[in-house]
Amino acid sequence: MKKIALIPGDGIGPEIIEAAVRVLDAVGRFEYVTCYAGGSAIDRFDDPLPETELEKMKACDAVLMGALGGPKWDNLPGGKRPEAGLLRLRKGLNVFANLRPVKIYPALKEASPLKNSVIGDGIDIMIVRELIGGIYFGRRQEGDEVAYDTLEYSADEVRRINEVACRLAGMRRGVVTSVDKANVLASSRLWRKATVAFYENHPEITLNHLYVDNAAMQLVVNPRQFDVIVTGNMFGDILSDEASVITGSIGMLPSASVGYPGEIALYEPIHGSAPDIAGKGIANPIATILSAALMLRFSFDMNDEADRIEAAVEAVLNKGLRTADLGGGEASLKTAEMTEAILSELK
Ligand code: NAD
């Protein structure tokens, strides 16, 4: 039986993780191990990620997380804060590829800031961002008059992120767009060269290249041209946030952070712990439920079960059922009611 490390975390985290577990239990049998990170770990252990908790996670087959952080821990020094636990968690699990599917459901078109004519019959993009290299991890020096950060990539790092992008494209429409700044940056020229060389062995994939400034424009002008976007850490950070707002609500978007095939991966909604609505039972559980579906697809090879969960989510949206963040107004469903609606579709 697959063993899932659950990190309920802080704020709305426990509420949305409970919802995801109910959905997981409706499609399969899993063993759960509750782990602590972030604020809940600080309260228990005075440490946002104790080594013992990380070891507990590593002994599982995948990690499903709610969200970490909140105002209660905001005044702690840097290394003691919940965010420090999150960075150590990603590094500790060696998850070098962050996957963010960006999908606009036809039923939620009105929630998108893009025009209907741009959205057409829907947008479905997978952004693959390199997560533990590039300028965020390069040598840096900080002075009062001069400071620098360095952007370094090796051909190996480019190859391994493209292995992930290529696998995903093979499961989708077979088109990869690599985003760089090769007209200016040496590291981008290496990125492009290594990317071109990689796809020479994958003729089944169509490879395109875009400069990052153009890619930022294309995402809002013609997002339907994209299938898989692969890019470095900082470009991916910016583009994935831009892409996520075009879907309308932050409560809808899942993410996966993965390493080498067969190694442990981390699944979480892209939103935070939403302290403003914590404890009210009104959080949208869909991003976490879809993160659980990604876990089934990528970590457990349970594609049918993942398809069923995704179809159930789409079906409740098509019926007009909405939580408050989706503009449900007076008729808004609470977290538990939305979860029930998804469970009934699964039956
Ligand atoms: P947030 O994503 O928690 O909330 C932003 C807004 O979106 C809020 O109004 C919130 O109510 C709403 N929202 C978010 N998720 C929702 C959901 N599922 N259903 C309905 N509404 C939802 O971002 P924030 O307020 O900037 O951050 C709050 C805390 O979360 C901070 O401590 C931050 O550091 C942390 N955070 C954690 C993660 C993570 O664990 N990966 C990510 C982002 C922020």
Image: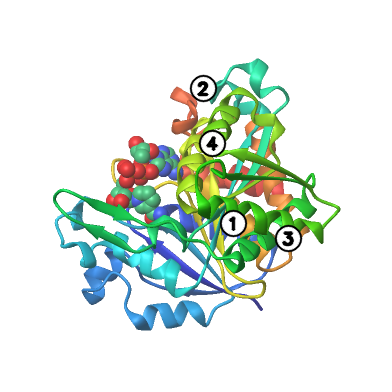
Rounded to the nearest angstrom, the CA distance separating label 4 from label 3 is: 26 Å
How far is the residue under mark 1 from the one under mark 4? 26 Å
Nearest to viewer (mark 1 / mark 4): 1
Which residue does the numbered mark 4 point to in the structure image? 243
Q: Looking at the picture, which amino acid does disc 2 mark?
A: Pro
Please state if 302 lies on the left or on the right of 326 as rendered: right
Q: Quadrant of residue 225?
A: top right
Mark 1 or mark 4: whose residue is earlier in sequence: 1
Residue for badge 3: 198
Q: Which mark is residue 113?
A: 2
Q: Nearer the viewer, mark 1 or mark 2?
A: 1
**Nearer-N-terminus badge (1/2):** 2
Seen from the viewer's position, the closer of residues 53 and 179 is 179
Q: Identify which amino acid the numbered label 3 is placed on.
A: Phe
Q: Which of the two labelled residues, at mark 3 and mark 1, occupies the earlier sequence position? A: 1
Categorize mark 4 by other alpha carbons within 10 Å: few (<14), some (14-19), many (20+). many
Whether residue 78 is visible, yes or no, is yes
Ligand 1: does it lie within 8 Å of the C-beta at label 1? no
Q: CA distance from mark 4 to mark 2?
A: 11 Å
Helix or strand or loop: what does disc 3 sit on?
helix
Q: Could you tell me if the residues under marks 4 and 2 are in contact, i.e. CB atoms within 8 Å? A: no
Q: Residues within 10 Å of mark 2 (few under 14, many from 20)?
A: few
SS class, disc 1: helix
